[in-house]
Image (cartoon, rainbow, N blue to C red):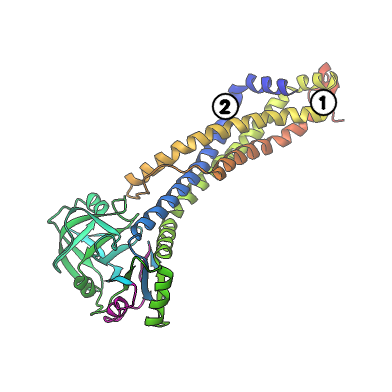
């Protein structure tokens, strides 16, 4: 029966090609979406860990109400004297004050509005700072700014050009450098403007206050021990967090910015699989009608209704396995294509090797096989009900036993 099932499936490959295509498209969109989001998540985790690798602890106000791309936007500022108090704690090798907030860029009078955050931050050199200079130099004067390479390329901004930064206050600043974020040209779906500490304080109207303090531990001091020392020094009104927690929060915020893409791909997959299910059911219904006499001869030759049922479902299983295999391969290619297409439309996704997990493989085969076999159950039951007497041609559809 299994040999007959395989031969029957191959004999009708032209009729079943449309069915196969519909299932392949559904599996492709589903696996492509999973591969793309898994890849982006892993790359973002790596990038944010790399960006915070030079910082052991971060001191901030204890309460936060919102964040975007790992940039806090609703914490109270820290008093001006706090960085010096932290720097005096035994075991602290460096305590760098930083200012972070939202600052909208304007180029030639037109606002640059990203789908993510408009980051305004004070410049801190690596390895404490998350950004590295790709060309030009860091800001040295209060009328200078460096921006991320992705924004500069996308809006044709070059060294020496003047841009407007709108935060609580507004300033026209000269671009003196372009920076990258880890291996990337910037933060995903965001703009980055880095200025001197006094300039950032003025633009955000912080006076002499700062947003956070980046702490580097001395070589012989464990970060956990240093965290306890700093917490005891600054009191309960401040949050002392390990850099790995800050990196995890930033990566999670970045993944949230990309979650819509997975929803779109999964919606397309669901639509394709729904169409495929109708095609499978209709195709098998037509095939069963055309094979009534053949199935009746099998019954007359001794095949049971269960064997006929398993034969038809076996055909569906072969189609489902084939569609899942092809769809999985196309899903890998689709993930690369979608990433390139998203970048062309101004939605850059993390670059790097694709991540194919065991879960994605299992989902691909589960989706393809379950949809195909499930859609063939009704026609298979009708095939199993064909009576042997239908082989004589007197009853086209047979009489159920």
310 up-or-down from 150: above or below:
above
220 up-or-down from 84: above or below:
above
Check disc 1 and report the residue beneath it: 398
258 up-or-down from 377: above or below:
below
For the residues labelled 2 and 1, the Cα–Cα distance comes to 28 Å
Q: Residue 214, how many percent across, how many down?
A: 32, 69
Task: Please identify the residue farthest to the top as the structure is shown.
Answer: 392
Marks 2/1 in contact by CB < 8 Å: the verdict is no
* Residue range (magenta): 70-91
> Which quadrant of the figure contains the C terminus?
top right
Is 135 magenta? The answer is no
- Residue 195 seen in this snapshot: yes
- Residue 274 seen in this snapshot: no
Judging depth in this view, the residue of 79 and 313 nearest the camera is 79
Q: Quadrant of residue 12?
A: top right
Q: Residue 38, how many percent across, how many down?
A: 47, 48
Determine the secondary structure under disc 2: helix
Labels 2 and 1: the sequence-earlier one: 2
Tell me what residue is drawn at x 36 percent, y 67 percent. 220
Judging depth in this view, the residue of 379 and 255 nearest the camera is 255
Q: Quadrant of residue 71?
A: bottom left
């Amino acid at each position: 029966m299994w040999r007959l099932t395989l031969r029957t499936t191959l004999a009708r490959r032209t009729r079943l090609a449309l069915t196969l295509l519909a299932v392949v498209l559904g599996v492709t969109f589903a696996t492509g979406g999973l591969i793309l989001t898994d890849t982006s998540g892993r790359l973002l985790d790596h990038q944010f860990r790399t960006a915070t690798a030079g910082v052991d602890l971060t001191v901030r106000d204890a309460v936060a109400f919102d964040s975007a791309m790992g940039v806090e936007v609703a914490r109270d500022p820290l008093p001006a004297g706090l960085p010096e108090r932290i720097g005096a704690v035994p075991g602290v090798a460096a305590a760098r004050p930083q200012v972070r907030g939202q600052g909208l860029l304007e180029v030639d009078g037109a606002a640059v509005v990203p789908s993510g955050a408009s980051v305004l931050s004070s410049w801190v050199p690596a390895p404490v700072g998350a950004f590295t200079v790709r060309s030009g130099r860091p800001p040295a004067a209060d009328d200078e700014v460096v921006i991320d390479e992705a924004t500069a390329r996308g809006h044709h901004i070059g060294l020496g050009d003047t841009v407007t930064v709108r935060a609580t206050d507004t300033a026209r600043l000269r671009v003196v450098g372009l920076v990258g974020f880890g291996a990337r040209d910037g933060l995903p779906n965001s703009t980055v403007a880095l200025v001197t500490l006094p300039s950032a304080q003025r633009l955000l109207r912080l006076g002499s206050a700062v947003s956070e303090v980046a702490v580097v531990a001395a070589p012989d001091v464990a970060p956990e021990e240093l965290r306890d020392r700093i917490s005891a020094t600054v009191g309960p009104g401040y949050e002392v967090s390990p850099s790995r927690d800050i990196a995890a929060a930033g990566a999670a915020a970045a993944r949230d910015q990309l979650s819509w893409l997975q929803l779109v791909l999964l919606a397309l997959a669901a639509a394709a699989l729904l169409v495929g299910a109708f095609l499978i059911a209709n195709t098998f219904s037509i095939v069963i009608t055309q094979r009534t006499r053949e199935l009746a001869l099998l019954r007359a030759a001794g095949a049971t209704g269960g064997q006929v049922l398993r034969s038809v479902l076996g055909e569906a299983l072969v189609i489902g396995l084939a569609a899942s295999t092809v769809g999985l391969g196309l899903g890998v290619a689709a993930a690369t294509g979608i990433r390139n297409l998203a970048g062309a439309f101004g939605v850059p996704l993390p670059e790097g090797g694709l991540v194919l997990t065991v879960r994605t493989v299992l989902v691909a085969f589960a989706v393809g096989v379950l949809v195909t076999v499930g859609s063939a159950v009704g026609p298979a039951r009708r095939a199993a009900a064909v009576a042997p007497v239908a082989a004589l041609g007197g009853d086209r559809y047979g009489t159920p036993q």
